[in-house]
Amino acid sequence: MRRLLAIAAGALLVACDPPPATHLEQVKARGELVVATRNAGTTYFEGPEGPMGFEYDLARAFAEQLGVRLRIVVPGSLDRMLDMVARGEVDLAAAGLTVTEARKRRLRFGPPYLQVTQQLIYREGRPRPRGLLDVVGARLEVVAGSSHAERLRALKRTEYPELEWVENPDADSEELLEKVWEGRIDYTIADSNEFALNRRYYPELRVAFDLGEPEPVAWAFPRRRDPSLQEAAAAFFTRIRADGTLAQLEDRHFGHVNGLDYVGTRTYLRHVRTRLPRYRGLYEEAARRTGIDWRLLAAIGYQESHWNPRARSPTGVRGLMMLTLATARQLGIRNRLDPRSSVMGGARYLRQLIDRIPKEVPYPDRVWMALAAYNVGFGHLEDARMLVRLRGGNPDRWIDVRGALPLLSQRKWYRRTKHGYARGREPVRYVENIRAYYDLLVWITERERLRLPESVVETGSLPEAARKEPAGTTDATL
């Protein structure tokens, strides 16, 4: 009888136990979202302002919505990352992963938020392959465990049995692009967004052809756990699509990547070597005085004058930073052709513009808006922000202001503004170019920081390993 009572009591206790916590509840209870990613320009890296990258910003926003800290984990390889997700060692992977049938058998995927196309990449100067038959017998290398390798295996089974390639377990797509640029391999396959971002650094690289149709990119979740965190992520992406956050992040990270063509990039790299050294000290001094990154100031100078201190525009602006006569007088500058006066004046003027932008405008949007004002005038910038409000947008987001600036050249719109007509497309292009010049200059100065051999600096090539932080973990407390 006692035994029966004990069994009954045990059963009652079991019945009263709360059910196991869901994946989402576990994340909230520990106060931490653990996200696996990879070091790449399209995902996550340590930038001048700390952790950066499209996937990092998305993961940080998701963690903030959940009310927890974000912990980033960078596994040593793509295969290792997928294994960590499959075994539940991390909560999810936010790494620019394309959704493939093979991956769907191991992992769950959230809603797609990008579309990318696999592209065969070669270097200009070699014959352009027209199809995979032209690649047979050449040195084709892809990342081990990647969707590119998966696509090649499918094509080998169905159409190209003679196709051969190497799957590199120790490299990623950006490193393989560099190997093509250096001539160490003939071809690689890259996703379209990664190629667009990296062609600025390797301007001789070209797309031979696309391998198939665009593919969705999504976060990956463990199949062995319940879908509660995946469902929370789906709600998160629904919200950021609706409120414009997703579009804003896409613009922040990829909106300027096509600003420079091949000739413009090569000319800029040459001028970095031959012209910038004369004025770099001035830009660094201006940075110390204003708190603005000297590389951003130098990028403005290049956009304005190509670092020519005697430059003059048809409208009368002059000098390295192309100050108007009225701005020079306001700043107390007597000689706009004096390099030091021009750089210090331009930096002070930009500082004033940044400080005039409303405090609620976040970084880096406030910087892009200040740059637009540097080009077109603060009054026209305010007119564009007013038009954004009129059209139901958010005047505190650069992507919305960028869309409104060209309206300043249309009578239908500029007659509603305080300052009237402006060539509104010019500041849009102006900001895109400066962002591209700035990114390149950051890339170049990172090589200096790492003290790479002079031969590397002269050729304009940066080994991929030198651009990345070592694998490991980084805590980012929100």
Image (cartoon, rainbow, N blue to C red):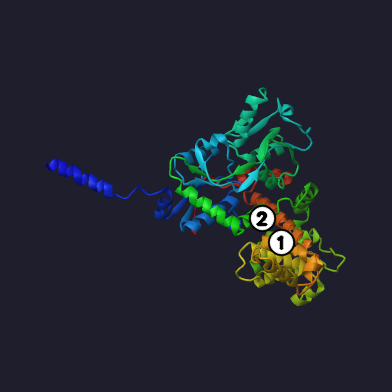
- Which residue bears the numbered disc 2? 251
Q: Quadrant of the N terminus?
A: top left
Please state the horizontal and vertical placement of residue 295, each as a whole percent of the image: 69, 59
**Helix, strand or loop for disc 1:** helix
Spatial separation of the CA atoms under disc 2 and disc 1? 10 Å
**Total marks in image:** 2
Identity, as a three-letter code, of the amino acid under mark 2: Asp
Residue placed most toward the observer, 148 or 403:
403
Q: Which residue is mark 1?
A: 402
Residue that protrudes farthest toward the top in the picture = 162
Q: What's the residue at 80%, 58% (across, down)?
A: 306
Q: Quadrant of residue 465?
A: top right
Please indicate whether residue 431 sits to the left or right of residue 238 in the image: right
Q: Position of residue 370 (x, y in %)?
A: 69, 67
Image position of 397 with respect to 117: above or below: below
Percent coordinates x, y for residue 415 in the rendering: 79, 72
Q: Residues within 10 Å of mark 2 (few under 14, many from 20)?
A: some
